[in-house]
Image (cartoon, grey):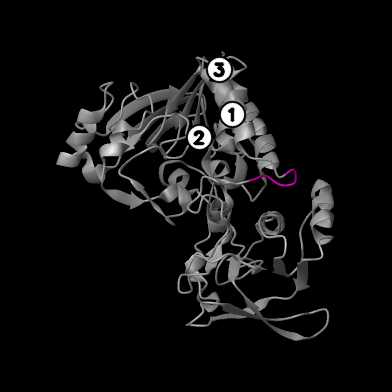
Amino acid sequence: MSEVVNKSILVVGGGMSGLTAAIEAAETGYEVYIIEKEPYLGGRVTRMHQYFPKLCPPNCGLEINFRRIKANPGVHLFTMSNITKIEGKEGNYTIHVNTEPRYINENCTACGECAKVCETEIPNPFNADMDKIKAAYLPHPFAFPMRYVIAPEIAGSDEGKKCADACKYGAIELDMQPKETILNVGAVIWATGWTPYDYTKIKYYGSGKYANVISNVMMERIASPTGPTEGKIVRQSDGKEVKKVAFVQCAGSRDENHLPYCSGVCCLASLKQATYIREAYPDSEVYIFYIDIRARGKFEDFYTKVEKDENIHLIKGKVGLITEDSKTKDLTVQAENQETGEILKLSVDMVVLATGIVPNSDDAKSVADILCDDDGFILPDVETLGQYGAGCVCRPMDVAASVQDATAGALKAIQSTVRR
């Protein structure tokens, strides 16, 4: 006898993988719910300056996906939300969703009047805390949904009331409370993405101690026109323009003390970021210290193109030590050139650490029967159907591969919701 199952699908995570899985499922007629912990969709891709290898802005691809979501009434969004409990089995899950208060309702037009009267500033997570934003803020200029957020720091204060009085549309609700929603779905797709490895843990590189030693994620935001320096690539210590920059590959990766695995995309990210510097400063010199360059398949042409730049120097060698001149804040990078045997001591203005991908699988492991490998990446579990991983939470991959993997995840979820 066949069993009737629930025909809706839950997607946890609103980054590129989650958006793709949700759209692909919804456009085949399924009801889809997207759960996202941030106040906006787009995930890590929204924080990129450019994609490789075409070096185009990511908002192009995101805008198309946002348009498809807005056009499909079968897609339902829960931002600032997380899963607290999952019950049931394949074909029939009960999902408990907790939504934190945004203190802004759907009347918001993103006019910004609340921010004009707000004086309190808070660290800006979108820019890796390198600058500050008002406590009444739009998460970023391309935010979807295009709606402000009132930080809890001022929600119950006189300043919060001042923001509410400035709103002409009645969009600010300072008495909002956390809300629980219960959903019934037939399958779950975990597309919770990744977090950059904490570069401050790599002490021998002066991470977190030397202002001009930054991570690749920070570099991406610095190069962006919407970043903390409005796209000007300058040092954190003094705002000085950079003329000599070193990239350190495998910073904490392929290292048993940090991340034992290779994240696959870091080499290409550094090659891409080297082009940012060369474009900004035509007389600049860039040095990339690497163990081996991983630019497979179609990305080989991109590697070859960057390699031809005479001012970009690829040095095969693991950086052993980085020191700082306490007066000038210049950095000295020490490494052995494995091809020549020479010990190099290179003085540079800034060092960019290519840190790896850490899967955001903790939420899945805490509420669901999800299998992960020793590094935290979600494994395919043929014994327990109904819940599937998609994108970088399964393994390190670039954006294009994430889209393909998410499409496969959508197909698996659909198969879990057919009549059995």
Counting from the top left corner in percent of width and height, residue 354 is at 62, 62
Location of residue 418 with respect to 137 vertically, above or below: above
Other-residue count near label 2 (Cα within 10 Å), few / some / many at <14 / 14–19 / ≥20: some
**Disc 1 or 2, which lies upstream in sequence?**
1
Location of residue 13 with respect to 10 vertically, above or below: below
User: Mark 3 and mark 2: span between their CA atoms?
Assistant: 27 Å
Q: Secondary structure at mark 3?
A: loop
Counting from the top left corner in percent of width and height, residue 287 is at 71, 69
**Disc 1 or 3, which lies upstream in sequence?**
3
**Which quadrant is the N terminus positioned in?**
top right
Residue occupying image coordinates x 43% and y 45%: 363
Q: Nearer the viewer, mark 1 or mark 3?
A: 1
Location of residue 390 with respect to 244 vertically, above or below: above
- What residue does disc 2 label? 142
User: Mark 1 and mark 2: span between their CA atoms?
Assistant: 9 Å
Q: Foreground: 382 or 237?
A: 237
- What residue does disc 1 label? 63
Other-residue count near label 3 (Cα within 10 Å), few / some / many at <14 / 14–19 / ≥20: some
Q: Quick check: can you spot residue 259?
A: yes
Q: What amino acid type should be assigned to the residue bearing mark 1?
A: Glu
What span is colored magenta in the figure? Answer: 50-54
User: Mark 1 and mark 3: span between their CA atoms?
Assistant: 22 Å
Residue occupying image coordinates x 62% and y 39%: 58
- What residue does disc 3 label? 30
